[in-house]
Amino acid sequence: VPGSGSASMETAVSNFVEPGMKFAVFANGHFANRMSDMGQRQRANVVRLERPWGSVFTAAEASEFLERERPDIVGFVQAETSTGAYQPGIAITEAAHKVGALVIGDCVTSLGAMPVQIDSNGIDIAYSCSQKGLSCPAGLSPVSINDTAWECLSKRKEATWNWYLDARMQWNYFDSGHVYHHTPSAALYYAMHRALWLVEEEGLQARWERHHRSGRQLVAGLGELGFIPVVENSEQRLWHLSTVTPPAGVDEAALRERLLAKYDIEIAGGLGQFAGKILRVGAMGPLATEERVAHLLACVAAVL
Ligand SMILES: Cc1ncc(COP(=O)(O)O)c(C=O)c1O
């Protein structure tokens, strides 16, 4: 899809969530809210199961919600960048498939750094981006649609409400006919090709382990400096994006400013209900190494 992760999110939602459908969203962060917003703009009946930010849904919660609501389609975020929590997906997809619903999984932040595993996690429509785990420039986003979802889409009577992200029209290009649809950026395809080659060369498993190691190193080091992880359960934390609250008395925005001014290192603040309260520290792609993380920790300690 030509565009950033939001364009691939909109591709998933605008092709599969039709006006009047019931769209169940597992809402535990900012990007799940964005998905709900997109669903509402498609004139769907959006129903939400809320959970405190920083936590993930259990299979029992998913099943109770979906049995009650019996939606046509379900959406969840696998790697919620606004909170730092990881929800592989199977707890939600099994319950969704039992009630006959397709599942859209946001894999924007997981791809290239943590297991996505769309088939074993039961994700029917998955979308991602280029600029996070793959560490490419932003602007070209992978989308995956399985056979079951494609069959549903092929039966859709009304054309997708937006033209540019119409998956059926786009497929006419990728299919053997190469029917012109839009002009992509060739430079981004070269970048993506190179990034995937680097993943292949390193090996996916080795890449996951590298991100896992540097994530543990980062959280432990920040812990020694007095930062507290937002995601309490260490098993549910993203490996390459760590969310922490600053030590008492430390202003997060001022800290980020000092880090940028003195060391040219930019880390992110909170989004939505976490704005002004937490720090989101990414260590992904070439930055997820012991040396880079140690450097970051030393710089944070120096400006604390
Ligand atoms: C989980 C998740 N979904 C969607 C998006 C939107 O992606 P983009 O900013 O590339 O449009 C982001 C961006 O950070 C994200 O983290």
Image (cartoon, rainbow, N blue to C red):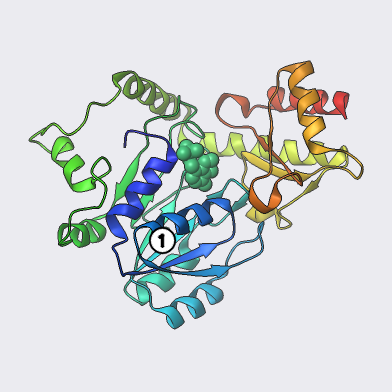
User: In this figure, which residue is indicated by the disc labeled 1?
Assistant: 40
Q: Which residue in the rendered view is the most extreme toward the left?
A: 177
Please, is residue 176 above or below residue 286 in the view? Answer: below
Instruction: For mark 1, give the secondary structure.
Output: helix
Please, is residue 219 above or below residue 186 in the view? Answer: below
- Side of 66 relative to 276 (left or right): left
Q: Amino acid at mark 1?
A: Gln
Please, is residue 289 above or below residue 102 in the view? Answer: above
Residue beneath the point at 37% across and 50% down: 126
The residue lying toward the viewer, choosing from 207 and 31, is 31
- Dot 1 surroundings within 10 Å: few (below 14), some, or many (20 or more)? some
The count of marks equals 1
Q: Is mark 1 within 8 Å of ligand 1?
A: no
| Position in image of residue 200 (x %, y %) | 41, 29
Residue beneath the point at 27% across and 54% down: 15
| Position in image of residue 29 (x %, y %) | 59, 55
Q: Which residue in the rendered view is the most extreme toward the right?
A: 249
Residue beneath the point at 33% across and 71% down: 72
- Side of 248 relative to 144 (left or right): right
The answer to whether residue 181 is visible is yes
Q: Dividing the image into 4 quarters, which one contains the N terminus?
A: top left
The answer to whether residue 112 is visible is no
